């Protein structure tokens, strides 16, 4: 078989959401920082992203990770989305940590704890891998600081009138109460949530782009619908992140959980060092805690918190993707 591309990956899922870590086949990238190398990849090799993430090899919500060297951290990595490049991705960071453990790249596999730093486009984060009985039992990432940029922004679309908080958690989120938006946080509610979420995102971003949302400087990447509950173990944020039309995060969303922490602390609903569980529509949890931002992190936005998010990923397979000669869809396709 004549082939024009060979790319190897290790795939995992984090609470249901896939991560595809590229382990070979990406040409050397130019640039001094991870952000610059991500930009070089986008400029010269973007068809590799769609080849790997779009159908028929991937799907609408597939996320990829390309590793690069870092002059500032133990590893460097940037995140590919099916529809855009992400500055940070929590579920994929957890997937990457489990993948690095699987590859034997982060310390003795019988050590109870291995830690590493990771440079991503959003900044430098720290990742801890806990092992029990020879297997990874939990991954914690200490995310870039999260903060609320705007509160109670009125948004209307498709006959739904709600308020959104605009919050940075490594990506930008519009946080909206699920019940007020008529969104059901269950697998049966996903199609409706995606339609409403995409329309609310467009309406919110129109306001931000026209300068009508004081405090918000950049359009939101996603809408996070939430509901807060409590049980004997504390607070649970049930949540569903709509990335874009026809795309939702299957996991509780690491950057979305970070944004939720900043919002709950800003509203006085949560104290520092008080863990909550963030739960996806499949009933799988992350544990998320807002900590004080370390003094050495330098100047921060008012009310910024340091999110610590704990979750777990599982390897699903190892792939060698090829592009066979004559394939009529060399760069894949995505239906919107
Ligand atoms: O876990 O941060 C996250 C994420 C962002 C987009 C998909 N997952």
Image: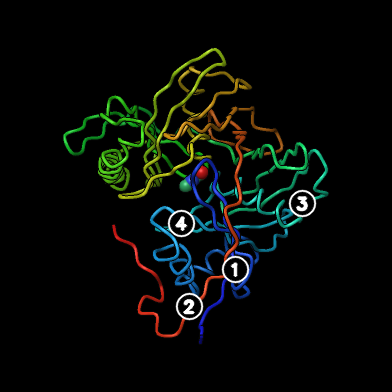
Above/below status of 57 relative to 198: below
In this orientation, which residue lies closer to the viewer: 42 or 248?
248
Indicate the secondary structure of the residue bearing disc 4.
strand
Res 156 quadrant in image: top left
Q: 139 or 80: nearer the eye?
A: 139
The residue nearer to you, when weighing 279 against 203, is 279
Count neighbours of disc 4 (C-alpha within 10 A) and say few if under 14, some if 14 to 19, many if 20 or more: many
Q: Residue at x 69, y 43 (%)?
A: 126
Q: Can residue 93 be seen in this view?
A: yes
Rendered view: 239 above or below 14 = above
Secondary structure type for disc 2: strand
Between 213 and 39, the one nearer to me in the picture: 39
Q: Do the residues labelled 3 and 1 touch (CB within 8 Å)?
A: no
Q: In this view, does 270 lie to the left or right of 111?
A: left
CA gap, disc 4 and disc 2: 20 Å
How many callouts does the rendering have? 4
Q: Which callout, 4 or 2, points to the residue nearer the camera?
A: 2
Q: Which residue is drawn at 69% across and 54% down?
A: 100
Whether label 4 lies within 8 Å of ligand 1 gets the answer yes
Q: Residue furthest left?
A: 159
Q: Name the residue under label 1.
A: 8
| Residue at the top extreme of this rendering | 232
Asked if residue 132 lies left or right of residue 265, the reply is right
Q: In this view, does 256 lie above or below 120?
A: above
Tag shown at residue 81: 4
């Amino acid at each position: 078989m004549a082939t024009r591309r060979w790319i190897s990956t290790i795939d995992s899922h984090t609470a249901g959401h896939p991560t595809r870590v590229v382990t070979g086949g990406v040409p050397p990238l130019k640039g001094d920082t991870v952000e610059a190398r991500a930009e070089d990849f986008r400029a010269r090799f973007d068809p590799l992203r769609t080849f790997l993430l779009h159908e028929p090899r991937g799907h609408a919500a597939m996320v990829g990770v390309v590793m690069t060297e870092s002059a500032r951290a133990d590893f460097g990595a940037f995140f590919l989305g099916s529809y855009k490049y992400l500055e940070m991705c929590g579920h994929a960071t957890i997937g990457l940590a489990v993948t690095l453990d699987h590859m034997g790249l982060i310390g003795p596999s019988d050590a109870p704890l291995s830690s590493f730093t990771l440079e991503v486009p959003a900044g430098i984060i720290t990742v801890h891998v806990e092992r029990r009985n020879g297997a990874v039992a939990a991954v914690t990432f200490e995310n870039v600081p999260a903060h609320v940029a705007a509160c109670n922004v009125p948004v209307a679309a498709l006959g739904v009138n709600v308020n959104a908080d605009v919050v940075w958690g490594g990506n930008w989120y519009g946080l909206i109460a699920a019940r007020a938006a008529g969104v059901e946080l269950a697998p049966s509610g996903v199609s409706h949530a995606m339609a409403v979420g995409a329309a609310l995102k467009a309406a919110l971003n129109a306001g931000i782009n026209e300068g009508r949302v004081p405090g918000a400087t950049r359009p939101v990447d996603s809408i996070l619908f939430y509901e807060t509950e409590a049980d004997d173990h504390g607070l649970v944020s049930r949540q569903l992140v709509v990335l874009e039309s026809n795309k939702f995060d299957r996991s509780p969303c690491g950057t979305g959980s970070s944004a939720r922490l900043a919002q709950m602390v800003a509203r006085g609903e949560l104290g520092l060092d008080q863990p909550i569980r963030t739960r996806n529509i499949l009933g799988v949890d992350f544990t998320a805690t807002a900590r004080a931002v370390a003094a050495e992190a330098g100047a921060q936005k008012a009310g910024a918190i340091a999110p610590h998010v704990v979750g777990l990923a599982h390897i699903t397979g190892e792939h060698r993707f090829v592009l066979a000669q004559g394939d009529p869809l060399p760069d894949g396709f995505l239906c919107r």
